[in-house]
Image (tube, helix red, strand yellow):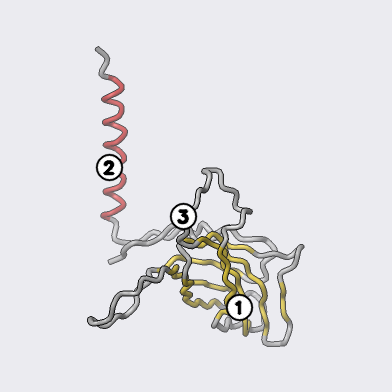
Amino acid sequence: MNHVPAVSLVLLFGSMTVTAQSLVLDKQPAVLNLVPMSSSCPVGISVQHRSGLERLEANQPQSKEIAQYLQVTMSNSRSVDIVAAQITAHGFDAKTRYLPAQFPRTASPGLTKTVNLDLTVKSRGNESTDLRLARFTAVSWIDLDSVTYADGTTWHSSAGKTCHVVPELMRLVGSR
C-alpha cells in the first residue's frame, strides 16, 4: 500500500490554504499594474474594473441591464493640457457563445462602443474618469482613438500608431 501521493496532495492543498488565508488577513489591498500598453501611445493610460454601485429607491425595481464599470486613468507627459480624448471599448455581451481556450486576442469580441472621455488632463498630470458600459459582460481591451490638446493639435490612431490597453487583471473585492 502506497500513501505517499495522498500525503503529497494534503501538503500541497494545505500550503495553498495557508497562502490564501494570509492574503485575506492582510487588510491593505495589493495593487498590481498588469496593463500591457502599446509603445506608440501618446499618453499613459490604464483601465481598472470598478464595482457598479447605483442608488435605487426602496420601491424601485432593480435594473436588469448588464454593464461593466471601469475607471480610465490618463497620464500626460507633455507640456500642453489634454482637453479631449476618445476611446473604443471591445468586449462581450451576454449572448451565449463558445470560445476555445486558446482564444486569440485579435479575434473580434463582437461588442464595441466608442466613448468621448469627460476629463481634462493638466500638463504633466494625471486624471481619472469612471465609465459605465451598458450591455458589456466583459471588456477585452480599449483602443485610444484620439487625443486633443489645448494648443489645437490632435493625435489620431492610425495603422502605424495604435494604442491598446487591457483592463487590469486584478479586481479588488473589498478593502476595509
Which amino acid type is marked by label 1? Arg
Nearer-N-terminus badge (1/3): 3
Residue at 34% over, 61% down: 173
Q: Are marks 1 and 3 in contact (CB under 8 Å)?
A: no
Nearer-N-terminus badge (2/3): 2
- Dot 1: element: loop
Q: Nearer the viewer, mark 1 or mark 3?
A: 3
Q: CA distance from mark 1 to mark 2?
A: 44 Å
**Residue 81, percent from left and from top:** 63, 84
- Dot 2: element: helix
Residue at 62% over, 63% down: 164
Q: Which mark is residue 2?
A: none
**Residue 133, percent from left and from top:** 48, 72
Q: CA distance from mark 2 to mark 3?
A: 34 Å
Q: Are marks 1 and 2 in contact (CB under 8 Å)?
A: no
Q: Please, which residue is most extreme toward the bottom here?
A: 151
Q: Please, which residue is most extreme toward the right here?
A: 160
Residue at 25% over, 18% down: 3
Bin the neighbour count of mark 3 within 10 Å (Cα to Cα): few under 14, some 14-19, many 20 and up.
few
Of the pair 110 and 17, the residue shown nearer to us: 110
> Which residue, given by chain and number where applicable, does mark 2 sit on?
17
Residue 103 in the figure: left or right of residue 32: right
> Which residue, given by chain and number where applicable, does mark 3 sit on?
96
Which amino acid type is marked by label 3? Thr
Bin the neighbour count of mark 1 within 10 Å (Cα to Cα): few under 14, some 14-19, many 20 and up.
few
State the quadrant of the C terminus: bottom left
